[in-house]
Image (cartoon, rainbow, N blue to C red):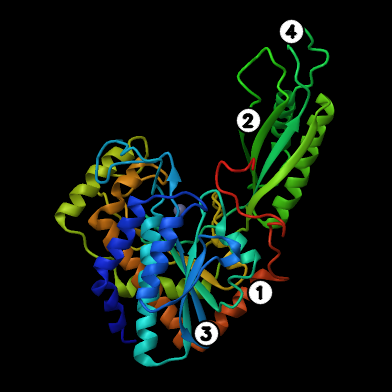
Amino acid sequence: MDQQYLSVIDEKAALLEDVANYLWDNPETAFTEYKSAAYLCDVLRKEGFTVQENLAGIQTAFSGTYGSGKPVIGILGEFDALSGLSQEAGCLEQKSIGGEAGHGCGHHLFAAGSLGAAIAVKKWLETTGSSGTVVFFGTPGEEGGSGKSFMARDGVFDGLDAAFTWHPGYANKLWTDRSLANYQVLYKFDGVPSHASNRPDVGRSALDAVELMNVGVQFLREHMPNYCRVHYAITDAGGMSPNVVQAHAEVLYLIRGADNATVKELYQRVNDIAKGAALMTSTKESHVFIKACSNLVHNTVLRKVMHDKLTEIGVPELDDQELETAKRFSETALEGIAGVDANDPVWEEIWDYTENEVQGYSSTDVGDVSWVCPTAQILTATFARGTPPHTWQMVAQGKLPQAHKMTRYAAKVMAASAVEMISSPDLLAKAQEEFRSRVGAGYDAPIPKDVFPKAMGSFKK
Ligand SMILES: [Zn+2]
């Protein structure tokens, strides 16, 4: 197929770099991405997309649509940052620039790449006059918020025939790992304050309840199904005074399992443990459901298309200076990571196609989109090989030429995959057939209807 329309991504290179750099300069964490969302909506409007804001009642969730009729292809774009990761761009050592947050997962590139893909699909639709619609989705709060899961629960992705996405990384490959479903729940205990030495008899310690709950969960861990994980953080230990019986304490739990049903069941067992801890300490227990996300449903038809496009388009070449910079970052990031050679700092090959779906241990809210329509994603080598996610090294590399170049590569692969699906109804039908057989009875949103997204640190409100 004529891939002339993909050249618009190179023609718009400066725009896409501006977008990524603006987001990098204004890092905003889950559900507070006001500047980033406004900026992206503005660019979408200028590029001729019809923008819809406030999706699923989330102020920073939006879409940009172009075209008409079927099929409708979604391109997902994340843009939230991580707290505590302020870092100088290009700097080879950890050096804060005084900010609160930083783009430690490359989501500034993520948004720019997905935007580039949507622009190229729009170009193709315009040029060919074909029936079809492309929708760019600005999906906020991926980090700790599962924005897409709220959007999916509220039907935002319902009209899609397929969705494509990507993630910045250090290899050029399909995303084939299975992901874990999860629930995040805040457990609160209320007791009775008292002088811990004068009148311990009247005090009822909420902190004791938290400790007993954690012990109970520790015993639960031996008896969980495979792949389950249960993590916690004590978010309120009840104060700084050991001589006051702690009347209030809180612990935030993250419960993971291979699929939604497993997590749902495990959540009930954790609830029972919380109740038991309250009973043992004569305190009161309550909990707040913060968020959840589903496991990924893979689609080999879409995956194969994406792999073909990765190969056809080919990995962009990096010049000597870009490779040298990557090498120096590799050296800072690789200490302690076995099996990676800093003399080979960029993954310039494309990983082999595989139908193998290995169980991974991370979670992604792309999972919920993948329960609603056939979905596939790739990674491209925007960062030096071995760069761990959520680190200052990733923030520091976020504005380098390699990052921008590989973002455009991802944009081209997504655009070409979307165009392939729009122009091949048979292939799309096959993808949908596989999708239906994998989801069986369909999507049962893991987030209860009365739960709304909460920004980090605002759980108590
Ligand atoms: Zn990420």
Disc 1/disc 3 C-alpha distance (Å): 20 Å
> Which residue is label 1 attached to?
437
Residue at numbered disc 4: 197
Answer with mark 2 or mark 1, whichever residue precedes in sequence: 2
Q: Secondary structure at mark 4?
A: loop
- Alpha carbon distance from label 2 to label 3: 49 Å
Residue under pointer 2:
236
Residue 7 location, quadrant: bottom left
* Outermost residue, left side: 320
Circle nearer the N terminus (4, 2) = 4
Q: Residue at x 74, y 7 (%)?
A: 197
Residue 273 shows in this picture = yes
Foreground: disc 4 or disc 1: 4
Q: Quadrant of the C terminus?
A: top right
- Give the residue type at disc 2: Asp
Give the residue type that dot 4 points to: Ser
Query: What amino acid is at disc 1?
Result: Ser
Q: Secondary structure at mark 2?
A: strand
Left or right of residue 292, residue 177 in this image: left
